[in-house]
């Protein structure tokens, strides 16, 4: 049951307002470009697949390689962030992935496509869990649900903006001798490099280093975060690679990773394949880009409201599980609804679920992990979910679609994964498990 909350003091309000405005808008813009650079291959595929002579299965495999290298490098990247500091490490991530994303414009065939997608995943690995870790340095627990949801709005917002932008960039076909899909990669990759450089001046590693806070604001925030840290049973906890090894044997962490895989699969698969799905209704490239943005626009609004409601009520369990159930119902609806309008409504439901999931889930998860486990734990859960949801399911979708030509059948495995994930969340967070869950994860037993 959620504890009764007292009204925040004036000092708390001004401190958190200043922290939020300093960190959140900039990190949201950075993440927006992360999703643009990761997912623009979906819009590019409307021209690129034919230009490079790739089958649907080949394209799906190449697109999925991003998630395999992302999985391999995510935990090392988050541990490096702890060692080198968020300011320098996040800047490093952004500069390298921006350069590689722009370089996607020069792939020549399926082998170079495979190589570039693989190294793009390695370059971007650690950004999302790194930012989640960074936010735990700055946000008390009762602010995380709504602000993580606010941060996560960059995901649907990226496609809401990127889909029509991609359609326009594809229309630059032939400018300076380049195809439209080449312009798409260049125009969306270069700004990321510039944002990475700006990171070095905008970000501050820890609250005690924040000269932009008043002394009383800095003291309140540090004391509040120290109080929360001290309340966790972390005396026996290891840090760094030691905590990671412990987490590998923890069934609760694997259950959370599998639950997260359903939402990851929904977002990743639709990010790569939704433009081709919608174009199958006979749309032009520009029409596809415009209509593709609609479900993401709906998700932008509802995911923030859902995260805010989760914080207001202090409830995480059902706020997480219901989003996974919504994804599953949306995908199953494809079997009975075949019109373009109906399909857009169903895809909107799926993406609302996929992105509204993030606020309550990551607030729940970061609350379960101890101070030494949080870096490795967040990275491990996100890495595994990306491997299953992105690496595996993007591949499965392409293979099933190639074999059957049926988008509904290709989406069915994701519907099954999300139902399993919802069940796991409800089981592991039952009240009778709640008393033992946090110590188990904190100690890595």
Image (tube, rainbow, N blue to C red):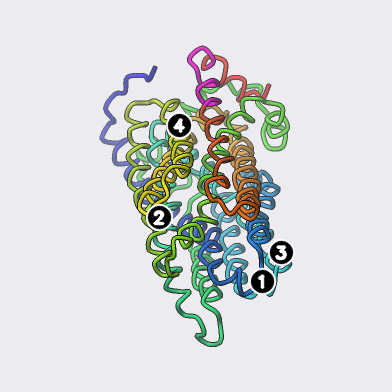
**Is 319 on the left-hand or right-hand side of 131?**
left
Question: Disc 3 on helix, strand or loop?
Answer: helix
Q: Is residue 215 above or below residue 395?
A: above
N-terminal label among 4 and 1: 1
Say which residue label 1 marks. 53
In the rendered image, the quadrant that contains the C terminus is top right
Residue drawn where x is 29% and y is 41% of the image:
14
Q: Tell which circle, 3 or 2, labels the residue nearer the N-terminal end.
A: 3
Q: Is residue 39 above or below residue 360?
A: below
Given this view, does label 1 or label 3 mark the residue nearer the observer? 1
Q: Nearer the viewer, residue 311 or 394?
A: 394
- The residue singled out by tag 4 in the image is 320
Q: Residues within 10 Å of mark 2 (few under 14, many from 20)?
A: many
Q: CA distance from mark 4 to mark 3?
A: 36 Å
Q: Is residue 113 above or below residue 371?
A: below
State how far apart marks 4 and 2 are (Cα): 21 Å
């Amino acid at each position: 049951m959620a504890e009764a909350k007292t009204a925040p003091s004036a000092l708390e309000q001004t401190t958190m307002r200043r922290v939020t405005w300093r960190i959140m808008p900039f990190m949201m813009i950075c993440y927006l470009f992360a999703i643009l650079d990761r997912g623009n291959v979906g819009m590019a595929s409307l021209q690129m697949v034919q230009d490079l002579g790739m089958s649907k299965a080949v394209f799906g495999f190449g697109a999925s390689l991003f998630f395999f290298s992302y999985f391999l490098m995510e935990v090392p990247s988050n541990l490096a962030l702890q060692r080198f500091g968020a300011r320098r490490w996040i800047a490093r991530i952004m500069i390298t992935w921006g350069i590689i994303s722009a370089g996607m414009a020069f792939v020549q065939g399926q082998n170079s496509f495979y190589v570039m997608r693989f190294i793009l995943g390695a370059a971007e690995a650690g950004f999302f869990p790194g930012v989640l870790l960074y936010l735990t340095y700055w946000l008390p627990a009762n602010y995380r649900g709504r602000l993580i949801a606010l941060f996560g709005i960059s995901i649907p917002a990226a496609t809401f903006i990127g889909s029509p932008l991609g359609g326009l960039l594809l229309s630059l076909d032939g400018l300076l001798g380049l195809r439209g899909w080449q312009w798409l990669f260049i125009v969306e990759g270069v700004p990321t490099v510039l944002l990475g450089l700006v990171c070095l001046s905008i970000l501050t590693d820890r609250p005690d280093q924040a000269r932009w806070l008043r002394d009383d604001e800095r003291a309140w925030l540090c004391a509040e975060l120290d109080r929360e840290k001290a309340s966790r049973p972390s005396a026996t906890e290891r840090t760094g690679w030691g905590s990671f090894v412990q987490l590998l044997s923890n069934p609760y962490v694997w259950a959370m990773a599998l639950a997260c895989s359903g939402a990851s699969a929904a977002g990743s698969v639709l990010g790569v394949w939704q433009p081709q799905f919608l174009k199958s209704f006979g749309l032009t490239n520009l029409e596809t880009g415009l209509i593709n943005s609609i479900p993401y626009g709906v998700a932008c609004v509802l995911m923030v409201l859902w995260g805010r409601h989760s914080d207001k009520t202090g409830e995480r369990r059902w706020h997480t599980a219901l989003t996974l159930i919504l994804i599953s119902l949306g995908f199953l609806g494809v079997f009975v609804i075949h019109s373009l309008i109906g399909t857009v409504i169903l895809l909107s439901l799926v993406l609302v679920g996929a992105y509204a999931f993030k606020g309550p889930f990551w607030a729940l998860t970061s609350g379960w992990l101890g101070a030494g486990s949080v870096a490795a734990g967040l990275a491990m859960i996100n890495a595994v979910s990306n491997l299953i949801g992105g690496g595996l399911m993007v591949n499965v979708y392409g293979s099933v679609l190639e074999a059957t030509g049926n988008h509904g059948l290709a989406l069915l495995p994701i519907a099954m994964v999300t139902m399993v994930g919802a069940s796991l969340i409800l089981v592991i967070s039952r009240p009778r498990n709640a008393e033992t869950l946090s110590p188990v994860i904190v100690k890595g037993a």
